[in-house]
Image (tube, rainbow, N blue to C red):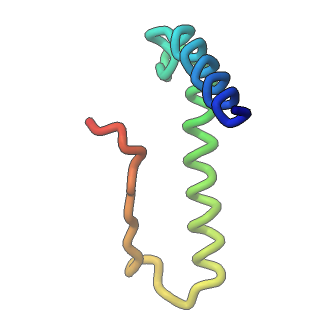
Amino acid sequence: MYSNEIKNTTKQWYEKYYQKKDQYRNSLLYNPEVAFQTLAHDLSIIRAVNYLTKISKVDLASWKTLDVGCGGGG
């Protein structure tokens, strides 16, 4: 019973959350938080690659990157 209560509460929270979304939620032009998150994401990748180049004996030019994505399609 407790598990069903958590599931229902979670479902209600997400329904309310997605009702509040507007057309500019993911816009770099209208939502400064999106720009910040984009920059933070890019910086995290740069830092990770920088760290790996310092600990790796392999030449950076021979590296391959696999971008898995988020599953949103498009």
Q: Where residue 16 sits: x, y (%)?
A: 59, 12
Which one is nearer the viewer's eye here, 25 or 71?
71
Which one is nearer the viewer's eye here, 7 or 50?
7
Q: Where residue 20 sits: x, y (%)?
A: 56, 9
Which one is nearer the viewer's eye here, 25 or 57?
25
Q: Where residue 55 sits: x, y (%)?
A: 65, 83
Could you tell me which residue is drawn at 38 percent across and 81 percent down?
A: 62
Could you tell me which residue is drawn at 49 percent across and 87 percent down?
A: 58
Q: Where residue 46 sits: x, y (%)?
A: 58, 58
Quadrant including the C terminus? top left
Q: Is residue 40 left or right of residue 38?
A: right
Q: Is residue 14 above or below residue 3?
A: above
Which one is nearer the viewer's eye here, 33 or 23?
23
Q: Is residue 64 above or below residue 45?
A: below
Could you tell me which residue is drawn at 62 percent across and 53 percent down?
A: 44
Q: Is residue 43 above or below residue 2?
A: below
Q: Is residue 22 left or right of residue 32?
A: left
The image quadrant of residue 3 is top right
Q: Is residue 4 left or right of residue 73?
A: right
Q: How many numbered marks are there?
A: 0
- Give the residue at the far left of this rendering: 74
Q: Is residue 37 above or below residue 20?
A: below
Could you tell me which residue is drawn at 67 percent across and 22 percent down?
A: 9
The image quadrant of residue 11 is top right
